[in-house]
Image: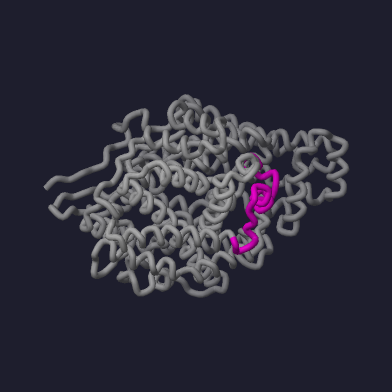
Amino acid sequence: MKKTTLPPRQEVPLEETWHLESIFSSVEEWKKAYQEVKEKLPDIRAFQGELDQGPDQVAGCLDVLEELLQESGKVVTYALLESSVDISDQEAAGRAGQARSLFSESLAAVSFIQPELVSIGFETLEGWMEEEPKLSQYEHYLDNLERLSDHIRSVEVENILALTTDPMPKNTPPQAYTALVNADLEFDPARTEDGRELEIGQSSIRSLKSDEDREVRRTAWEHYADGYLAFQNTLAGLQTAAFKRDAFHARVRNYPSSLEASLFENNIPVEVFQNLIKVFKDNLPTWHRYWNLKRKAHGYNKFHVYDIKAPLTSEKPEIPYQQAVDWICEGMAPLGEEYVSALRAGCEEERWVDRAKNRGKRQGAFSSGTYGTKPFIMMSYDDDIFSLSTLTHELGHSLHKYYTHRNQPFIYGRYSLFVAEVASNFNQALVRDHLFRTQKDPNFQLALIEEAMSNFHRYFFVMPTLARFEQEMHRRVEEGEAVNARSMIHLMADLFKEGYGDEVEFDQDRIGITWAQFQHLYMNFYVYQYATGISGAHALADRVLSGESQAAEEYLGFLSAGSSVYPLDALKSAGVDLTEPQPVEKTFQVLAEIVDRLESLVERGEV
């Protein structure tokens, strides 16, 4: 019996890995930078209790703050990226732990700044901005601080809250979760119809669940779920701790709920979340129609969850990494030469992308970087349409960082999660449109439909369902109700049952454990932003593709805004208003049109 396994990290080709040496040339250099950050902490603490002495003191403090956070950000980024590609590397894991502790210590050291600025008074601070030119760039920062001032606590309380980011409760649950599911969790292998065994790992599960062989898909999906079910109580304990962490912070900062705490931070009205959930539920029949079409296309009597990503054609296009980069560059051409050149250089010369498949590599894909580093990407590239899609998505995030860091000072050099998923899905919309127009082979067109529906399935079906789960679980925790693994599995299963309708065969526990497979739930109300993000992305992509005047320039302005304006205002300046339900409704129309396209092919017998 032949068995396919993943290579250890040290055996993967260098060109398939990212260039972390651009941050620190060696571990020794990282250790030196780590120590230098620790030695700078007294410099910022020296300003505590002194900010009310005048604008010079405030400007000096903010200069030291910027230097400290920028350097500590590099230390943290290097360590976390290094450990993410091989969870079994205990030395790298140790450095990641050190980095988290240092970042927590840095946050505690600077935690006095916001309470002291609030106590000075915003009328006084406005006057100081006129006196001291160095403070002029902080106008939006101080406006936002005034908006948040009712939720900022005393210097002592803020210091304690900052210190909790490392030991408890901020980081401990997700750290333990990451170690468990990426290093300790073991899965029985998937099997082919002819008896070969295929190793299941976080870097291989996606390709296994979309394999042409139904037995591979079934065993991969079942064994992957079973691995999580074997640790359901541990995973439930970690997830519940994260929900309780969110409730704790909401209460400490005087918010009515975890949801409102999450939304208020970015000036997002609660109606944005509510609109999304309502439109999603109203459009579930589109998903029910799709499941039925997939069943007919494959000739199955019964349709299972493991059939959702069954390929519509046996002639799956092979797309090597370099071909993917070329097509992505062609698809993004409407944004101009600067955008395309930066993207190509990142993929080909500067080694932003860690695309290797190896044992111990953590699940999923992400883009990560801080002010002063490259916008790195972690993924596992499979030479297929889905890997092209993932690379396209993550490059959207990375180019967002690229433009923000080039155009904003450090204070505005980050952007909210709410706008992050717009940039990633925008790239996918443009590249998908390009490939639909240029790659006319019927099998390639079918593969594109699969890719589009897979993307919509994740962001417009799974993520809103997880958001409903998250909302209900937060409510239960906030109201003191008992929660455990079984109640979480039952809730998740009930929500998916509504989404699948009568079209999909139901496996209660394996579907119900889905919540445990998403680290996103450790980030307070993150998952709903995938659905608002894909909605904003399609609205903006439509403007660019239809040739609207200034659409591309306005989109690049959105990418360059960072946190210099509120997220909704940045999107409005580019041409989309997510305070209204229309963008979500229109994006469901895009989804329905893709389902119509598939239905036409099925009815003509071309699938």
Q: Residue at x 65, y 42 (%)?
A: 550
**Which span of residues is magenta-colored?**
558-582
Q: Residue at x 38, y 45 (%)?
A: 362
Residue at coordinates 72% horizontally, 33% vertically from top-left?
A: 63
Q: Is residue 88 part of the magenta span, yes or no?
A: no
Question: In the figure, is residue 591 to the left or right of 406?
Answer: left
Q: Nearer the viewer, residue 237 or 229?
A: 229
Q: Is residue 505 above or below residue 30?
A: below
Name the residue: 13% across, 53% down. 195
Q: Position of residue 548 (x, y in %)?
A: 62, 45
Q: Position of residue 579 (x, y in %)?
A: 65, 60
The percent position of residue 214, horizontal first and vertical second, equals: 23, 58
Location of residue 265 by image quarter: bottom right
In the image, 558 versus 40, the foreground residue is: 558
Residue 75 in the image, given as x and y percentages of width and height: 53, 35
Residue 46's place in the image compared with 563, above or below, is: above
In this image, 371 relative to 315: left or right?
right
Left or right of 185: which side holds 253? right
Q: Residue furthest left?
A: 1
| Residue 38 appears in view | no
The answer to whether residue 295 is seen in the rendering is yes
- Magenta residue check for 573: yes
The residue most toward the front is 604
Residue 187 found in image quarter: bottom left
Q: How many marks?
A: 0
Q: Quadrant of the C terminus?
A: bottom left
